Amino acid sequence: MVTISVNGMPPKTQPVDRKYFEDDVKAFEKEHPKIKIDAREGQMDPKTFSAKLAGGQLEDVYYVYFTDPAGLIQRRQGAAITDYVKNTPRVKDIKPEYLKVFTGPDGKLYGLPNGQYSLGLIYNRALFKKAGLDPDKPPTTWEGVRAAAKKITALGDGTVGYADYSKNNQGGWHFTSWVYSMGGDIAAQKDGKWKAAFDSKAGHDALQMLHDMRWTDNSMGTRQLLQIDDVQKMMGSGKLGMYMAGPDNIPTIVKQFEREYSEYGVAAMPGKATLGGGNGFMFNPKASPEKIEAGIEWVLWKYLNPDRTEFEDKRASGNDVPIGLPLDRLFNGAAETEQDRAHEKYANVPQENYEPFVERNALLDQKVEPPNAQQIYTVLDGVMQAVLTKKDADLDQLLVDASKKVDTILATVR
């Protein structure tokens, strides 16, 4: 018998999710009588992580965001699991770009993903039709977005073609995705050191497009300094054509503003790449081989198990949970087909509205957030705010000034 501590258990404030988790622990232990799960709430907290590891308090299996593994691997705070999973077919079915997040410079694997998201465009299908646009063929380039936004804005009555964030680090987050989509980077590593990389053609093109949509076309509205809840409210009111977001925004809009799922579509990010993120699990480097092996078995069974998808969808379908949104598409081949079949069986949202996202998102480069992302986003918020509130903003100078500040932030990356 081996007991493993794992975190990621939902808090008591989420009673349905917590019950599902507890039920899954019981089912797992029944199927694996030699493994006992010591489940704990919480996720990876960078502020307490090192102290927990040094003090022997870190869980054997711990939850991380995609931005965490690179630093954890560099500091040797995660166990290598390559030898444990080399003959595991299910791991081979995971899309390479998500395994890459958990792969160290030594080529070894240090963790497993269990969820992912990609930013795209949420759009109002009715406004597309009203403006003479095909809601089944949303734009795939920023030039197309600009043209569509102008047509939607021309409908009048306070309708806004496209909106974007510029507050509370959300503007910097979105500017990062803009730069990625234009083929650029926010930060790049050279000779072991990180430097700002957005004072580039991609960075300039992103700011120029935002400037032109805001000031030349007047298709972004006059109200700026927005954040996510502002823009969701605009979409929920039926007065916004498009905004950058992941598919998980749709349930929020539907529930908060009493809309219908059929009203919204999702397109993939225009351009060459998108900002993606997600989460997964890594393993305590001080854990015994038996605990690591058992921990991998738990993660594979609970989070990376296409055989359980139908059961999970059926269970969730009775609790007003949207099924069929294009989320957490971690697998290739037969495993993905199996999951898609289950989602289609229990789907309670119009999957055809998301086909433009599913088809094209697979062709985009999925890029993760830069190191020290939140500090960088604070700087880039200022860039977004300047472009959207000052018609005569000097785009090149904004990039130069922000790059100097970001270089200082990146100098602390270890």
Image: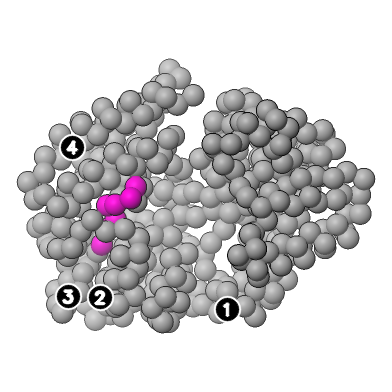
Q: Does the magenta stretch include residue 12?
A: no
Cα distance in 3D space between marks 2 and 1 = 26 Å
Q: Residues within 10 Å of mark 2 (few under 14, many from 20)?
A: many
- Numbered mark located on residue 320 in the image: 1
Q: Which of the numbered marks, if any, corresponds to residue 398?
A: 4
Mark closest to the chain's N terminus, 1 or 4:
1
Q: Which residue is drawn at 27% across and 52% down?
A: 166
Q: Going by the image, does 171 lie left or right of 43?
A: left
33 left or right of 137 in image: right
Give residue 222's position: percent from left, percent from top. 14, 63
Residue 411: x, y in percent?
38, 23
Q: Name the residue under label 2.
A: 239
Measure how far apart labels 2 and 3 are at the Cα level. Answer: 7 Å
State which tag comes first along the sequence, 4 or 2.
Answer: 2
State the image coordinates of residue 356 (x, y, percent, origin top left): 42, 66
Q: Which of 100 and 280 is in front in this view?
A: 280
Question: Badge 1 local density, few (<14 within 10 Å), some, or many (20+)?
Answer: few
Q: Which amino acid does label 2 sit on?
A: Lys
**Foreground residue among 373 and 201:** 373
- Secondary structure beneath dot 3 equals loop
User: Does residue 23 appear in the picture of this structure?
Assistant: yes
The residue type indicated by label 1 comes to Asp
